[in-house]
Image (cartoon, helix red, strand yellow):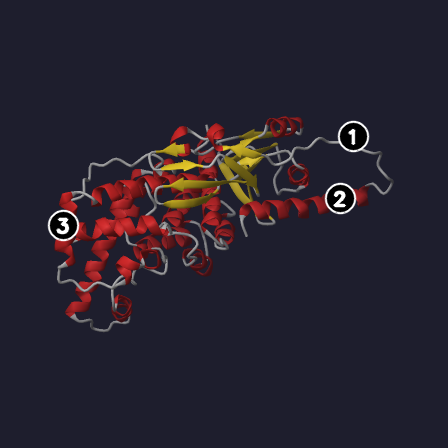
Amino acid sequence: MKLTSIFLLTATIFATTVRVHAQVQSPSPAPPAAPVAYESLPTLDASVILQLQYFHGPNFTVRNPVPTYFGCNHYTIDSDFGVFEADGNQMLMRRVAEINAIAKLQAMSQTREFTQAAAQAASAPVKVAEDLVTNPVSTISSVPRGIWGFLNRAGEAVKEAAEGQQSTAAEGNVVENMTGFSKIKRDLAIKLGVDPYTTNEVFQRELNKVAWPAFLGKFTVDLGMAAVGGAALSAANITGSLTDALRDKSPAELRLMNLGMLMNNMGVSRATADAFLSNNAISPTTQTILIAALAQLGNIPGQAEFIRQAATSQDEHDALAFQQSCQLMANLNDSTPVARITHLHGLTVCQTNNGTVVVPIQWDYAAWTPATERFITALKAQKFTTPVSGYSVTLTGVVSPMTAQALAARGVNVKTKALPGPLK
């Protein structure tokens, strides 16, 4: 279930609890309340809300109508490489980065040097699985089950090695070659500012086309190329050491690193860690960024439950929502230490050392609707184990003027655009 859907469900459950509580405390009918003004969810204009580099580029344009529902802006992108959909601001940044990277890769593959290198690579005596070129997404992006589907017999070779069986020299070379090719792809993708494990088939196909002759030593990629505009990984604000790990470590190595941090540093059980790390909806990149952000909070109560909730992600959007929630808490922790993480019917809430209850949430556009009001009312009615000194909603997007006014009137602080994003 998406976090936005959980938010609405939470609001409904909380509101019911509040109404029942009110009925118990006040059996006599209350006087009619003054009517409350609400607003409808708008259709936004991409040309108005987006920074130019995310609205239009040499190879793409975002369609102007941007409907918003379930907390997300929904974008349609027309590009030279097809029509792409982006469910939310974060996904828009990823798609724009991928489109710009596809253009860069295609331009590279059209040079005379590349054409000659590709012809030499095609005649190289290396056994390659057909899926490596024809079906890159199912092979590259099936992680964290592993990248061992690249070449024929690769999976069996790894299985035999794990079971202590003797592999032939040919099988050993296959694994070695596969690992090297994968590293080339990761290196290229990260330099282009794209998640190496993206499910974008067009990008993966173009990446394979360039990476294969480079892997065989027939073609030298310009390693000085800068990440293209709209680079999603750059916007994620990850550290240099984290970038190095994503580039240099295989999915299996990332899994071991992340498993150690979850179990040894955060007290996460092996079963919960495995459920999180084995969920194919959560790419190794998202897993690594999320865990690194969670680790910045120190060993505080609620981390294991957060991982258990994140393990239920059903798609890429779900996973990114949990990642951004973690990054919001990590940023908050830099100025006001986070004391604990709490989950209210699936909604992530944290409390700082000074007692403030903070809702760190991926929310592109917050309108003042009945559901929003019920959510705020129900949140303030919740009982916490430690005294509450205030309430705050920290979100990745923006709020409408009416929402800002209504939250202020209810004593709820709001912080908008709390992570780098595509909005003006």
Secondary structure of the residue carrying tag 1 is loop
Q: Residue beneath label 1, please?
A: 34
Callouts 2 and 3 close, C-beta under 8 Å: no
Amino acid type at circle 1 is Ala
Residue 303 located left or right of residue 208: right
Residue under the point 26% across and 57% down: 133
Mark drawn on residue 195: none
Amino acid type at circle 3 is Ala
Residue 320 in picture, x, y percent from top left: 45, 45
Mark drawn on residue 117: 3
Q: Nearer the viewer, residue 302 or 115?
A: 115
Residue under the point 36% across and 48% down: 285
**Position of 44 relative to 23 (above/below):** above
The span from disc 3 to disc 1 (Cα, nearest Å) is 74 Å
Q: Nearer the viewer, residue 80 or 29?
A: 80
Q: Residue beneath label 2, please?
A: 19
**Position of 155 relative to 47 (above/below):** below
Q: Is residue 174 visible?
A: yes
Badge 2 or badge 3: first in the primary sequence: 2
Q: Is residue 356 visible?
A: no
Badge 3 or badge 1: first in the primary sequence: 1
Residue 421 in picture, x, y percent from top left: 43, 34
Circle 3 crowding by C-alpha within 10 Å: few under 14, some 14–19, many from 20:
many
Residue 325 in picture, x, y percent from top left: 49, 41
The span from disc 1 to disc 2 (Cα, nearest Å) is 17 Å
Residue 10 in picture, x, y percent from top left: 63, 46
Amino acid type at circle 2 is Arg
Circle 2 crowding by C-alpha within 10 Å: few under 14, some 14–19, many from 20:
few
Judge depth for marks 3 and 1 and give the one in front. Answer: 3
